[in-house]
Image (tube, rainbow, N blue to C red):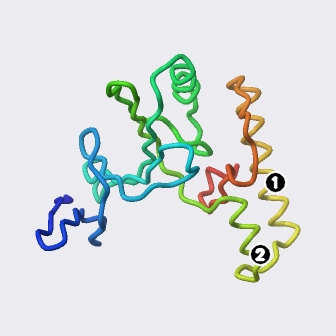
Amino acid sequence: MAEPAEHSENRERTVNVRGRTRPYLECRRRDYFLLERVGSPFRESYLAFDPLSSPGGNFFLVQSLPVGKSTEQLLRVLSRLKSDAFPRVMEWQRKRDQIDVALTWVEGISFADYLQNIREGRRPPVDPGQALRLMNGLANSVCHLHRRLQVAHGDLQPANVLVTSHPAACK
């Protein structure tokens, strides 16, 4: 079990994350330790760790959204997503003028970063079979959204697509 600790000499708050001590920004809700800010600078999103969610703990994406009709609609849509190809809402909590939403964390690299790594020679070029597998996974995921859930993504771009080795996310 993770034990938060405060170091008096430098006031850095830390938490034990799977045997490694990591600093955290703050603790929200029950035990969501916000480790680092992620994603767009225009959205308040954090990589969070919950030591109590399973043996060894789990990572989550915690987003703070403004209270309002658009957020309520977004939560209804997100709660319908049951596929491993998309982050799923685990829980949310209203806090004054914002709603903190905990979503499953999907481990991967953005498609934009993936392509940039290829351009800069840090990753070999993608062979045609791999490219076809990646595009097939993306097409299936978008079709799942449109056909089964009747949801339009609205912002499909390389920065918003994750390349992952998780087999369920690549169906």
Q: Residue 64 appears at what percent x and percent y? A: 44, 37
Q: Residue 120 appears at what percent x and percent y? A: 76, 80
Picture quadrant of residue 10: bottom left
For residue 101, side relative to residue 161 (left or right): left
Q: Amino acid at mark 1?
A: Met
Residue located 28% across and 51% down the image: 26
Q: Amino acid at mark 2?
A: Ile
Which of pointers 1 and 2 lies earlier in the amino acid sequence? Answer: 2
Q: Residue 159 appears at what percent x and percent y? A: 69, 54
Residue located 81% across and 72% down the image: 126
Cβ–Cβ under 8 Å for marks 1 and 2: no
Residue located 15% across and 63% down the image: 5
Circle 2 Cα neighbour tier, 10 Å, few/some/many (<14 / 14–19 / ≥20): few
Q: Residue furthest right?
A: 128
Q: Residue 134 appears at what percent x and percent y? A: 77, 58
SS label for mark 2: helix
Point out which mark residue 118 bears.
2
Residue located 77% across and 80% down the image: 124
- Quarter holding the N terminus is bottom left
Picture quadrant of residue 8: bottom left
Point out which mark residue 135 bears.
1
Residue 87 or residue 41, whichever sits in front = 41
Q: Residue furthest left?
A: 8
